[in-house]
Amino acid sequence: MVQKCPTLMIAEPGSGLATALHPWAAEKGYEMKVVDNIKDALMTLQTEKIHVLVMDVCMAQAMAYEAIAIIKGLCRHLPIIITTEENNAEQESTIRQKGIFYYHVTSFGMEELIMAISNALARSMI
């Protein structure tokens, strides 16, 4: 049986995060799906096996954070990593209550995000 390479979905309004993560993902042999709106994210989750979702906080906010609950309803065990530019304690608390895997403030750097993605992939590939 052939093991399919892990698939990482990046959901963000621009492409900065996807561009920054692409060399690392390619080196590791990971497939990357990139979407720029919540509708495409939900459609992809319904039709493809995604191992980790990295989502910009503005996409989670678009539906008053209900996007996370909807995604969890579709893929209960999918690790969700939320990224944000601004460290906001109230926002972080609200999002963590939704059952995400990791909350990443982009100013902390790519190394930390890559470590979180690696940990999430290790868990989701079990």
Image (cartoon, rainbow, N blue to C red):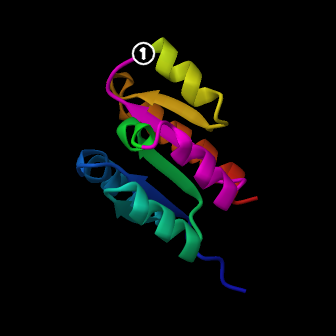
Is residue 33 shown left or right of residue 68?
A: left
The N terminus: image quadrant: bottom right
Is residue 50 shown left or right of residue 108?
A: right
Residue at the top extreme, as displayed: 89
Q: Is residue 23 above or below residue 104?
A: below
Q: Is residue 96 visible?
A: yes
Q: Is residue 118 above or below residue 97?
A: below
Q: Position of residue 102 (x, y in %)?
A: 57, 34
Q: Position of residue 8 (x, y in %)?
A: 49, 59
Residue 33 lies in quadrant: bottom left
Residue drawn at 23 percent across, 49 percent down: 14
Q: Is residue 84 magenta?
A: yes
Q: Is residue 48 visible?
A: no
Residue drawn at 51 percent across, 37 percent down: 65
Residue where numbered disc 1 is placed = 88
Q: What stretch of residues is rendered in magenta?
A: 63-87
Q: Is residue 59 above or below residue 35?
A: above
**Dot 1 surroundings within 10 Å: few (below 14), some, or many (20 or more)?**
few
Say what amino acid the circle numbered 1 marks: Asn
Residue drawn at 54 percent across, 38 percent down: 116
Q: Position of residue 57 (x, y in %)?
A: 41, 36
Near-viewer residue (90 or 123)? 90
Residue at the right extreme, as displayed: 126
Per the image, label 1 sits on a secondary structure element best described as: loop
Residue drawn at 31 percent across, 52 percent down: 18
Q: Is residue 75 magenta?
A: yes
